[in-house]
Image (spheres, rainbow, N blue to C red):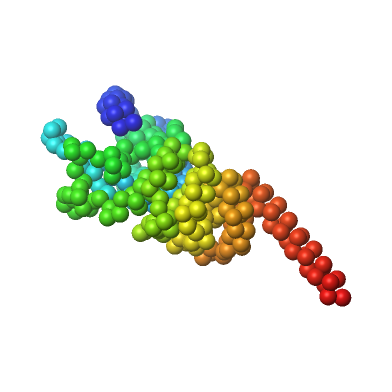
């Protein structure tokens, strides 16, 4: 993926320059005194920028939502922007940042630069009578927009997903000796300082990030009676929560049984008040939901910190299989409870 991006970058730059030079030469020949020409330029610029601003606003909204998802809270290493005349033999610099935070920061930067560009172009045209800027931005606006990785991902890719590495970012295990990590001030951070103190926590997070490609056999081998209820430091995730959220991974049910057999407790909650069946409901893991409910039906009666039951969460996320299953078993349980109550009354009479 990173190699493809590197080879594609020069091509994009060449195409942009190939278009920009003729546009600038043609714009200089425009008659800025002709009312008809100015009117047509204004209409073309207004239409094109309306489309561009709409795309930018759409991107910002999608990015804002994506930045709040639990899946996007993991730390990644984003490559620093290329600088002119940089030493080609120098180490490639990466900045450590939360993935969701970087998504939101990129979207804000795009929104700000787009609105600033519109205001400047319009201001120069109104106060200075410059028509060339309208012509150039009418043509170049879409080219500048499509270079943004978020716009590419939303309009030409699969959306904002960590697995696609739309920023050419790396995870800790993917960094090499040719890479250098810096903080916000440009200070180099040693690789040793980046390594988490707990290797099992790192394995938990790597398993979650791997999704359906996760090696559950390797993960289960690392789970013991000591760490089967261990929580991750930042969000309080446990091994059972991670397994319950891996909806598309083979062997999930067997892994859940193995962790419970070691003493794993699905009633444990994370920092948002989610227990393991909340995770299954949110991520649409019907197999995990069935296994957990059969183990302990009262898991479905627990509300998170926002007051949501697992059933409500499944409905809200559109996970129809999980919602239908929980509706059926909860209704059956309620019916059985009423029957027992009636029989108890008859016996007392």
Examine the rendering and report whether any part of residue 248 can be seen.
yes
* Location of residue 2 in the rendering, given as x and y in whole percent from the top left corner: 30, 32
- Residue 84 vertical position relative to residue 262 in the rendered view, above or below: above
Residue at image location 43% in from the left, 49% down from the top:
71
Q: Quadrant of the C terminus?
A: bottom right
At 31% across and 40% down in the image, what residue appears?
169
At a point 25% along the width and 47% down the height, the residue shown is 95
Viewer-proximal residue among 306 and 81: 306
Residue 283: percent from left, percent from top: 53, 48
Residue closest to the eye, 172 or 249: 249
Left or right of 261 in this view: 73? left
How many numbered circles are shown? 0
Q: Residue at x 13, y 33 (%)?
A: 89
Residue ranking furthest to the bottom: 349
Q: Quadrant of residue 87?
A: top left
Quarter-of-image position of residue 345: bottom right
Q: Residue 109: percent from the left, percent from the top?
A: 33, 48
349 with respect to 105 (left or right): right
Query: Can residue 116 be seen here?
Result: no
Instruction: Using the image as rendered, state which of residue 219 and residue 122 is in the foreground.
Output: 219
335 versus 131 height, above or below: below
Where, quadrant-wise, is the N terminus in this rendering? Answer: top left
Q: Position of residue 46 (x, y in %)?
A: 44, 39
Q: Nearer the viewer, residue 42 or 68?
A: 68
């Amino acid at each position: 993926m990173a190699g493809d991006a590197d080879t594609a970058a020069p091509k994009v730059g060449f195409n942009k320059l190939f278009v920009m030079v003729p546009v600038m030469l043609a714009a200089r020949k425009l008659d800025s005194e002709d009312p008809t020409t100015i009117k047509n330029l204004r209409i073309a610029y207004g239409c094109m920028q309306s489309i561009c601003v709409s795309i930018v606003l759409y991107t910002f909204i999608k990015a804002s939502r994506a930045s709040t998802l639990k899946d996007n809270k993991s730390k990644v290493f984003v490559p620093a922007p290329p600088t002119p005349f940089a030493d080609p033999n120098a180490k490639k610099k990466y900045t450590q940042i939360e993935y969701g935070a970087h998504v939101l920061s990129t979207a804000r930067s795009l929104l700000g630069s787009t609105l600033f560009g519109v205001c400047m172009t319009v201001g120069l045209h109104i106060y200075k009578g410059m028509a060339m800027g309208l012509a150039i931005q009418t043509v170049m606006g879409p080219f500048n927009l499509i270079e943004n990785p978020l716009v590419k991902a939303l309009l030409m890719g699969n959306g904002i997903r960590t697995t696609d590495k739309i920023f050419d970012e790396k995870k800790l295990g993917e960094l090499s000796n040719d890479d250098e990590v810096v903080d916000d001030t440009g200070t180099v951070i040693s690789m040793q300082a980046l390594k988490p103190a707990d290797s099992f926590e790192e394995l938990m997070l790597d398993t979650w990030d791997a999704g359906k490609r996760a090696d559950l056999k390797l993960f289960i081998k690392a789970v013991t009676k000591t760490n089967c209820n261990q929580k991750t430091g930042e969000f309080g995730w446990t091994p059972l929560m991670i397994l319950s959220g891996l909806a598309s991974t083979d062997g999930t049910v067997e892994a859940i049984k193995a962790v419970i057999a070691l003493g794993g407790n699905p009633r444990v909650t994370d920092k948002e008040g989610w227990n393991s069946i909340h995770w299954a409901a949110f991520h649409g893991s019907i197999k995990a939901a069935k296994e957990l409910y059969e183990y302990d039906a009262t898991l479905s009666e627990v509300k998170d910190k926002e007051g949501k039951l697992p059933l409500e969460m499944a409905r809200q996320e559109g996970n129809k299989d999980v919602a239908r299953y929980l509706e059926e078993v909860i209704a059956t349980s309620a019916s059985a409870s009423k029957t027992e109550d009636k029989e108890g009354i008859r016996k007392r009479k």
